[in-house]
Amino acid sequence: MMPEAAQTLRVPGRAEDLAGLYGGIEGAELLGLLSREVFPGRIALVSSFGTESAVLLAMAAEADPAFPVIFVNTGKLFGETLRYRDQLVKRLGLTDVREVGPSAAELAAGDPDGMLFNRDYDACCQLRKTVPLQRALAGLDAWVTGRKRFQSATRAALPLFEQDGDRIKVNPLADWDKERLEEEFTRRDLPRHPLEADGFLSIGCYTCTERVAPGADPRSGRWAGSAKTECGIHMNWTGTAR
């Protein structure tokens, strides 16, 4: 049941306003409400099609199979990730998956030898992830992410609604723990990313992703050995990732 106050809201407010109106709603119900009533035609889900992505994608498909999904293909993703994406899209019946990535001209100017990752992690992420995503988000007022507090110390205070400049980020699974996530995988009978069983718990580009040691931070395999914790897509969060 939609909150009475929400029924009159047509112009999105700031993150704290949205939290007050919709903080008690979750899952497919929340995504459907946001896409139909709050941000019609102006919201998309951004997914890496990684190890935990299937749950949020399933919720979006349940809310609306045409819920827009943005997938950033950096050109350096595992082949297993691309095949997993195709499997999930077919399985869930998603009809609006938008693949974006760096242009040939951008790569020629910024990473002509394809080895920028070896020289500057941040510059490589900016070129291959952040810039393409910003293009894809043009014209949108909100976007949905799959981030969760348990994933790393830098996400420990992640809110449900987050101000992202003039846009709103929605983190529907922010307060989910690993146990609840696993229960949802089982309940929905969702397929797993093929690399997860091999110790890859957070998967990005093959150039910068390693297996995670038992009991370690799930994101410790990303840019291992460096101080980097975020690719740049989420560096505008008002926590320690800023």
Image (tube, grey):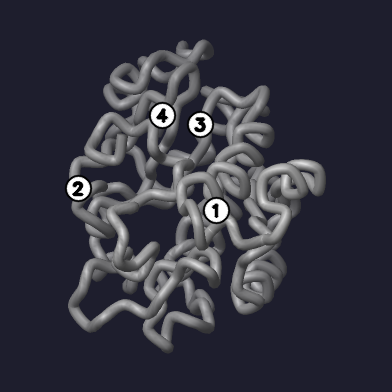
Residue at 47% over, 66% down: 208
Please report whichever mark, 3 or 4, sits nearer to the chain's N-terminal start: 4
Q: Determine the CA span between mark 3 and mark 2.
A: 24 Å
Q: Viewer-nearest of labels 3 and 2? A: 2
183 lies left or right of 93: left
The amino acid type found where label 3 is placed reads: Leu
Residue at 60% over, 73% down: 78
Q: CB atoms at circles 3 and 2 under 8 Å apart?
A: no
Please report whichever mark, 1 or 4, sits nearer to the chain's N-terminal start: 4
Q: Which residue is mark 3?
A: 34
- Residue 198 percent across, percent down from the top left: 42, 88
Q: Quadrant of residue 62?
A: bottom right
Q: Which residue is mark 2?
A: 156
Callout 4 environment at 10 Å: few (<14), some (14 to 19), or many (20+)?
Answer: few
Residue at 67% over, 36% down: 136
Please report whichever mark, 3 or 2, sits nearer to the chain's N-terminal start: 3
- Residue 17 percent across, percent down from the top left: 32, 17
Q: Which mark is residue 2?
A: 4
